[in-house]
Amino acid sequence: MNVSNITSFAEKVIESKGSDGDIARAPDTKIGTEETARHTTPMPLTPDMRVTPKDDPVFKSKRTPMSKSDPGLGGHRIEGDTGPMLKQGGGGEPPRVEGGGRGGGGGGGNGSSDFHKRAAPDQFVQQLHSGTRVVKRNLSFVMLLTCATNLLVLAIPIYLFQISDRVLTSRSLDTLIMLTAVIVGAVVMQAIFDAVRRFILMRTAVEVAVRLGAPVLSAAAHASLQDNGRQYQTLGDLNQLRGFLTSGTLISFLDVPFAPFFIFAIFLVHPHLGMIVVVTSLVLMVIAIINQKVTAKPFAEANVAQSKANMHLDSMSRNSQIINALAMVPEAVALWGRDTADSLRAQVRAQDRNIAWAAASRAARLLTQIAMLGWGAFLAIQGEITGGMVIAASIIAGRALAPIEGSIEGWNGFILSRSAYDRVRALMYNSVQRFEKLVLPMPEGRLNVERLLYVPSGTKQVILNGLTFGLEPGESLGVIGNSGAGKTTLGKMLVGSILPTSGNVRLDLMDLRNWDTRQLGENIGYLPQDVQLFPGSIKANIARMRADARDEDVYRAAVLADVHDMIALLPHGYETMVQADGSPLSGGQKQRIALARAFFGNPRFLVLDEPNSNLDTAGDRALANAIKHAGENGITVVVITQKPSLLSVVDKIMLMADGNIAMFGHRQQVLQELAKRTQSGGKLPPTAGENGGQHNV
């Protein structure tokens, strides 16, 4: 943040207003006690929109009061039986929807219907096991149908054998008709059983998507707290599994266990012919093992390179405007093409080997057919078997070896599907298990941050270093500091979008990780630095894409955020459709719509990260009014900003430097201290940019 802007603004504020009270700051800063009064214009709300807190004995605390010697976290002390105290002078009261209405908070309404109800647990491992049980159960039935299908496959060889050795020699028309009728029935039954098992496999694939689609997406979303979002590609792995369940490769794999049955049938014809098929089967098994060994590594390399290429493609789609504006298309295509080329080279290498060994297996099967016919003819000449037996044995041998050959040809699909399942399984097992959590009363907005430490995984860089501060319900805090000071990271932790390495963020004394996720999300609002809207109407975006959102809740959020007038000027008002890139809205309009989304649902705690980065003068005024409205309605607000214009509407200011709190206190006193240091030629606390700290936190 530009220090000269802050200090010049501080001097203007000090000239126009008196100052009193202290600030919590670095060791060499004076500390006072009282907050300067704020004079704001009340928000015009109708009586049914003005709400008051409930008086319910269930909220009374049984905590032991703190000793007088315990300094606590600063701010007003909380007595054991009164709960969080309201901000003195400026803040409004935490709301309660009259008449049992349905607010955005999970504990809203009349306070009794949802209290003590537990949220459904999110047991990813159990859901994975449930999906695999469905697959195993259906595959068990498919195996029964496969058994029947393979038994009926013998109908054609038996028919040929009987025609050659019985009908033609006896010249019996009745035998031919009866035999044909039986075989036709067997063939029809075989076709029906084969169709039914394919129907079951297709529906199994659909059921896998239905049972695991939402859990996989939820697990990927939770995993993104500690990841860069690449786990979302696991949905593609789920599609790979669906494709394998309906592929011919799986049918071949299911038919392979019945190959010994066909070989046994050939042994019944003649042991010599059976030995030929056994030797060929062993040769095909060796080919399959070699094929797996020589193709596993290049296929794995191809998958890794293709994943990188897909990530580049996603990045290009998100940054298409920048790529075109800065003429970066050749470079972006080159990045994608490099990984794609690596993937294609590995795939070609693997497929060349797979094709070569598949050709070897096909040649072995065809040579087996020749050996069966040739040696069978020799045995027929010797009078050991008949010509019909030779033909029947040849057909049965082909049926025994076909699934083995099909498995070798489809080995690539099996490898890809197995890798996809391993990634899905790893995601489900490694995701944090979300157990049942008590749905608590609607929070009042008291925030406590205790010894917050954050070190990104895989690094030793300390982004946040033991931060501790607190806010009462209805108070507002402006967080300032140079780029790289850790402001955005702090904002993400305050809403739970990333988890701290150690320490706690507490809302109404409860750690964010112990709140029911749905209830917590309904009771907080967040405006990120990088604003993104969802494809849909402005109304749907403000309502957080909830189908059960009420029009009055959407309107109230727009009024609180002071964006109703802006929306009314749009051609279709609240029904204006927004594309994935935010068009037809400007950057400032997108930011204001996202601000209204943060206000939706009667939240008790707001975090606004650079909320005025794209706003004009009118937008700045509307944002300042929105922060005032939040305070009047008892909403706790944390504003992260680089501009001093918002500091006039917040109650407290916190200056961050190198992941530490360099100064914290009431607005007037922090601005006064900054002005004093500038006037006396003193230096402000060191910043991340001066000490080489991490940028773009």
Image: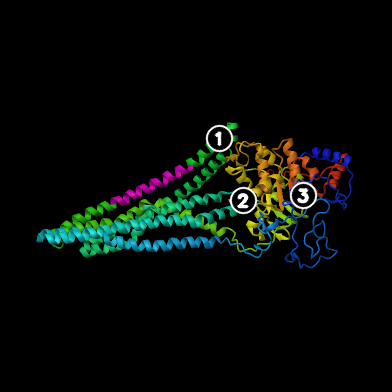
What residue does disc 2 label?
549
Mark 3 Cα shell of 10 Å, populated few (<14), some (14-19), many (≥20): many
Q: Nearer the viewer, mark 1 or mark 3?
A: 3
Q: Amino acid at mark 1?
A: Glu
The secondary structure type at the circle numbered 1 is helix
Query: For residue 352: magenta?
Result: yes
Question: Seen in the image, is 399 located left or right of residue 596?
Answer: left
Residue denoted by label 1 = 331
Give how far apart the Cα atoms at labels 3 and 2 are: 24 Å
Element on which disc 3 rests: helix
Q: Which mark is residue 631?
A: 3
Residue 550 is situated, as x and y percent measured from the top left of the image, at 63, 50
The count of marks equals 3
Query: Magenta segment, which residues?
Result: 342-363
Q: Are marks 2 and 1 in contact (CB under 8 Å)?
A: no
Q: Is residue 219 magenta?
A: no
The N terminus is located in which quarter? top right
From the top left corner, tell me how far across and down residue 651 is, in percent.
Answer: 80, 48
Task: Characterize the magenta stretch by its predominant secondary structure.
Answer: helix
SS class of the residue under badge 2? loop
Q: Quadrant of residue 616?
A: top right
